[in-house]
Image: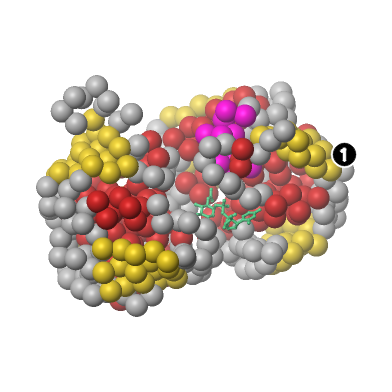
């Protein structure tokens, strides 16, 4: 049980390069199962979600080597279509392994992600889409077994543009007979990345990034060498690190277009942000309240930036409102921010944040990945010492977060459970 210990109050400055996106590499690793040939992926982030996904692939029979940022996978012929329950529980997004395993082996057995102690995670849209392609699904004792001798192309309307369901269905459709249309598909940049990766292997997918995706079935996929898009959420988190510490950062390897909803809102809050090709410059100053931040599917404001934005707005002059429209109950950071002196009240999907002059250091728990990052940001600006526990959540999505922040001038260290001073 490691912790972060932060002495707040220092302005961050410097330059950092953003690595490949977590939400691209996870479905792309699943998509690698669709070929038996060699897959090379560059700019892979060294985060714990990737390590868990690689453990799952190893259990299925994939040979893996990972040196520096280059990951090499040799899927060959897979041993099994059953994903071990413990690994499924560690990795909530592993549900999108169903599509590729159905495509490759015609069957799959996974434990239901809602059965883990991470809270319910509906997968109805995934299962409805697969069922309409001819997949027989049996849900029993917390497990989902799915089988299809032949997958049939289908016309699928998603009730909500779910990122995972769009990706799962796209991958199941690769080897289906005929073509599949996904209507009301999610439009996130990571879906375009998955399309580009699969097409580079020989798939025939069009329309990712729009709300209709068309997949024409093919017979096989080839080897591939692919570079991931940069992680827009890590970039967005560092933009707020600059803003909240009144610092000045240069972020390299960014696709500014992917961050437009975030940069527009932060500019409204008085953060200076300007772009130069694939580089973003950020300068923090006085923070202004924002009338409303509403999370929405892409290209709307990302739910994965909601908690970090809340940390910033705790220090704004005036009252701000955040409305969380994508996930139920995604305000787990609120109680912890209040321990640091923030003034926030939550009513259903809305949070009203009354700005204060200064946050104070406190002992807090990282409740999940993005809420954990939000607490680090709050700790960077707070007066005195902040101790953040349960940082394994943060390690799921931020590679060596404390080292990056140290490099930019922050006073943050990782301490082990054995360190009795903390
Ligand atoms: C992905 C991202 C996650 C991000 C989320 C929303 C990955 C690995 N993770 O998660 O970081 O926060 O998109 O941008 O890419 N839903 C259903 N039924 C379903 C599927 C989803 O009701 O079958 C609901 C969910 O409960 C949630 C909403 O749809 O309320 C969005 O979920 P979804 O887009 O599927 O998120 P993930 O793919 O899990």
19 is within the stretch colored magenta: no
Residue 279 position by quadrant: bottom left
Q: Quadrant of the C terminus?
A: top left
**Residue that appears at 26% across and 63% down:** 343
Q: State the image quarter where residue 85 is shown.
A: top right
Q: Position of residue 100 (x, y in %)?
A: 70, 41
Q: Position of residue 104 (x, y in %)?
A: 75, 37
Q: Position of residue 283 (x, y in %)?
A: 21, 65
Residue under the image location 71 percent in, 66 percent down:
183
Q: Is residue 331 visible?
A: yes
Q: Residues within 10 Å of mark 1 (few under 14, many from 20)?
A: few
Q: Position of residue 154 (x, y in %)?
A: 82, 58
Q: Secondary structure at mark 1?
A: loop
Q: Nearer the viewer, residue 393 or 220?
A: 393
Residue at point 63% right, 27% down? 84
Which residue bears the numbered disc 1?
149
**Quarter holding residue 95:** top right
Give whichever of 127, 49 is nearer the camera.
127
| Residue 369 in the figure: left or right of residue 125 | left
Left-right relation of 370 to 340: right
Q: Would you say 209 lies left or right of 337 here?
A: right
Q: Is residue 71 above or below residue 128?
A: above
Q: Quadrant of the N terminus?
A: top left
Q: Residue at x 61, y 42 (%)?
A: 114
Q: Which residues are magenta?
A: 85-95
Q: 378 and 334: which one is in front?
A: 334
Is any part of residue 170 visible from this angle?
Answer: no
């Amino acid at each position: 049980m490691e912790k972060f210990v932060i002495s707040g109050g220092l302005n961050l400055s410097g330059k950092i390069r953003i690595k490949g996106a977590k939400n691209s590499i996870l479905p792309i690793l699943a998509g690698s199962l669709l070929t038996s040939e060699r897959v090379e992926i560059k700019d892979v982030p060294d985060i714990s979600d990737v390590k868990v996904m690689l453990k799952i692939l190893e259990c299925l029979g994939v040979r893996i080597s990972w040196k520096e940022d280059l990951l090499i996978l040799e899927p060959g012929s897979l041993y099994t279509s059953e994903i071990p329950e413990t690994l499924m529980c560690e990795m909530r997004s592993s549900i999108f392994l169903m599509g590729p395993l159905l495509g490759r082996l015609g069957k799959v057995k996974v434990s239901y992600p809602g059965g883990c102690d991470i809270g319910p995670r509906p997968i109805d849209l995934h299962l409805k889409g697969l069922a309409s392609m001819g997949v027989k699904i049996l849900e029993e004792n917390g497990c989902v077994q799915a089988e299809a001798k032949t997958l049939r192309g289908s016309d699928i309307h998603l009730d909500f543009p779910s990122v995972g369901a769009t990706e799962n269905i796209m991958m199941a459709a690769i080897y289906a007979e005929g073509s599949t249309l996904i209507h009301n598909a999610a439009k996130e940049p990571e879906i375009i990345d998955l399309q580009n990766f699969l097409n580079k292997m020989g798939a025939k997918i069009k329309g990712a990034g729009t709300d209709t995706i068309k997949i024409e079935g093919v017979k096989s996929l080839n080897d591939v060498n692919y570079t991931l898009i940069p992680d827009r959420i890590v970039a967005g988190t560092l933009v707020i690190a600059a803003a909240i510490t009144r610092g000045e950062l240069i972020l390299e390897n960014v696709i500014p277009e992917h961050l437009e909803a975030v940069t527009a809102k932060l500019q409204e809050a008085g953060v200076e942000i300007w772009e130069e090709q694939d580089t973003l410059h950020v300068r923090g100053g006085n923070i202004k309240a924002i009338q409303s931040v509403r999370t929405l599917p892409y290209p709307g404001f990302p739910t994965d930036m909601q908690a970090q934005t809340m940390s910033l707005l705790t220090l704004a002059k005036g009252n701000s409102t955040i409305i969380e429209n994508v996930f139920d109950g995604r305000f787990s950071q609120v109680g912890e921010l209040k321990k640091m002196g923030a003034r926030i009240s939550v009513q259903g999907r809305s949070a009203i944040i009354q700005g204060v002059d200064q946050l104070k250091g406190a002992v807090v728990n990282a409740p999940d990945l993005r809420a954990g990052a939000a607490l680090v940001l709050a700790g960077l600006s707070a007066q005195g010492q902040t101790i953040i526990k349960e940082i394994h959540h943060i390690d799921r999505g931020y590679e060596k977060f404390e080292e990056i922040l140290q490099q930019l001038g922050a006073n943050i260290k990782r301490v082990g459970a054995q360190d009795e001073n903390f």
